[in-house]
Image (tube, rainbow, N blue to C red):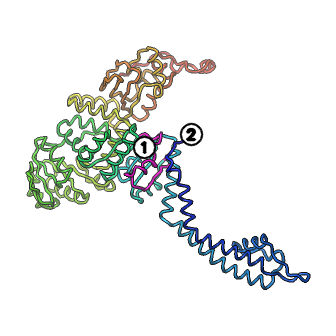
Amino acid sequence: MKVAKLPAALTESHQSIFLMVIRRLRAPLILLIVIISVSVLGLTLTPGPVVDGQPPYMSFFQAFYFISYTATTIGFGEIPYAFSDQQRLWILFCIYMSVIGWAYTLGTVFALLSDHNLRRAIALMRFRRMVRYMSDPFYLVCGYGETGRLICQALDRRGLRMVVVEINETHAAEISLSDYDADVPALAADVSNPDILLQAGLTHPNCVGVIAVTNDDNANLAISIASRLLSPHLSVVARVETREAAANMAAFGTAHIINPFETFTETLSLALHAPAAWHLFGWLTSIPGTLAKRRREPPRGAWILCGYNRLGRLLIEALNGNKSSVTAIDLQPRNDSPLPHFWIQGNASSRDTLEAAGIQKAVGLAVCTDSDVNNLSIAVTACDLNENLFVIMRQNHVSNHALFEAFASDLAFVPSETIAHECLSILSTPLLAHFLADIHKRNDEEWCTWLFDRMTRRLGAMSPEIWSKRINLSHAPALHRRLMRGETIVLDQLLHSHANRYEYLACEVLYIARDNGDELAVPAASTPIQPGDKLLLAGRPGSRNAFDLNISNDHALAYILTGDDTQHGWIWNKLVPSRYGKETYKRIPP
């Protein structure tokens, strides 16, 4: 097992804990030593009963032996002979002195065990040891709030390891109560401190990425800077909520910056301008197994926005870009700058305020305040006045999911889910982002409709599993060896089943990125595969393993290419007939 070398400062935890314990127990230990020493010395000087005319004396070994078991037990009797009254009197004094000494020592030990600093030092030592011996690739997750929790759960479901650093001790303690498949090293500390990041494995050889999802933009910026300087090869995904913080991160070269408000606004803009692409995006980026259905498209016309905050301003920009008029409602007074929309100051959950804003004639309602209770109250009141409204709702906390699901808004914005989904898309299937960008750049509604219909017809209405695969010796050894020998293999051949080469796998290749810079979106079946190609695939559950076997196993690849099923030894071929007899199956095109 490969063990990471940590900085020298990180190897001093055992010494620091030992010194801390010794300093706290110094006085009790000195007191115990003095009591035992005086007891032993006094016992050696006290005469025993007269034997043969002479009072015997105990040796130091005998006295120490007797004092030792007397201090810890009731005693085994008087040795090596019955004591004299003087010795018994001295033993009484020793017993009471040792009781006082041991009581003081045990009290100090119990106080030490409950000491916050010692417990933190022990937890830090255990955390360092777990991180140091991480033998599998792992992600460093900074922040374990709602977003971090969702990311960790998704990584665990995919069989990936993670290390978590969270400043809130209560949140960090929740990790030990979670049912993760593997142990998750967790530390309650300020993750903006570079030393903490080093201890959490930032420079560990098995660390493959950093996910900064704290609720503090400055902390996320500090994480991005530290990752850039200490481990520039790592992929960093950072959460931001302001454009200023995003600009600072971009200046330091942070590759992936996620602003949940801008991400949701872009989704709304896509739904307004390109509904077909919006449906396709939603189907490809949903959780696998989610039923895909055509959602109601945002209409054009008069909109009412409740909550003039960061999200509200971005939504107004998107709606104005779609030639829709917006009336904003907020409790705060209007600022002095001119606003490109109507403004009403008041309580948006009031029927009078909504009627004054023209709720009866509005086509849409966007509720984006910072309170989930207020958002639900506003939406329910507005729908009572106009049941045909297209409702966009902001859900601030995942714990309120049942309430928002019962209301069933047309479009929901959950910041933590938006960030978690973007993080996983970037880290697990980076080609998906390139494919979606290509669709957005194409701006072809007819093509998006055709692709959506084709994919759902082939793979079903459930959202597919999305994965990527690189054609190289480590990920596709069988295919790579054939290509390096000069064989020509087209995409269509790889999509056949190794169980029956006349049937197709339930998967599609959406995108090919080549080493020469060429990018192919929805490539044709006759597209030849080249060494180094990166494929983006979508398919039903189980098709991923089948496709991986096709490109990695020599026997499976030979069967789907040539029909040769003699992958076993001579004895097996004699005992077992070929997998299929004559080639009577019909080809089923995708």
Query: Per the image, is 242 magenta?
Result: no
The foreground one among 306 and 314 is 314
Q: Is residue 325 above or below residue 107?
A: above
In which quadrant of the rendered view does residue 234 lie?
A: top left
Check residue 331 in the rendering and tell me which mark sits there, or answer none.
Answer: none
Residue with the mark numbered 2? 1
Question: Which amino acid, mark 2?
Answer: Met
What percent of the width, then of the height, locates residue 217? 30, 51
In which quadrant of the rendered view does residue 42 lie?
A: bottom right
Question: Which amino acid, mark 1?
Answer: Tyr
Mark 1: few/some/many CA within 10 Å (<14, 14-19, 20+): many
- Measure how far apart labels 2 and 1 are at the Cα level: 19 Å
Horizontal relation, residue 275 to residue 130: left or right: left
Q: Residue furthest right?
A: 52
Mark 2: few/some/many CA within 10 Å (<14, 14-19, 20+): few
- Could you say whether the residue bearing mark 2 is in a helix, strand or loop? loop
What percent of the width, then of the height, locates residue 113? 54, 65
- First to last magenta residue range: 181-208
What percent of the width, then of the height, locates residue 451? 27, 29
Residue with the mark numbered 1? 139
What residue is at 55 percent from the left and 69 percent from the top? 110
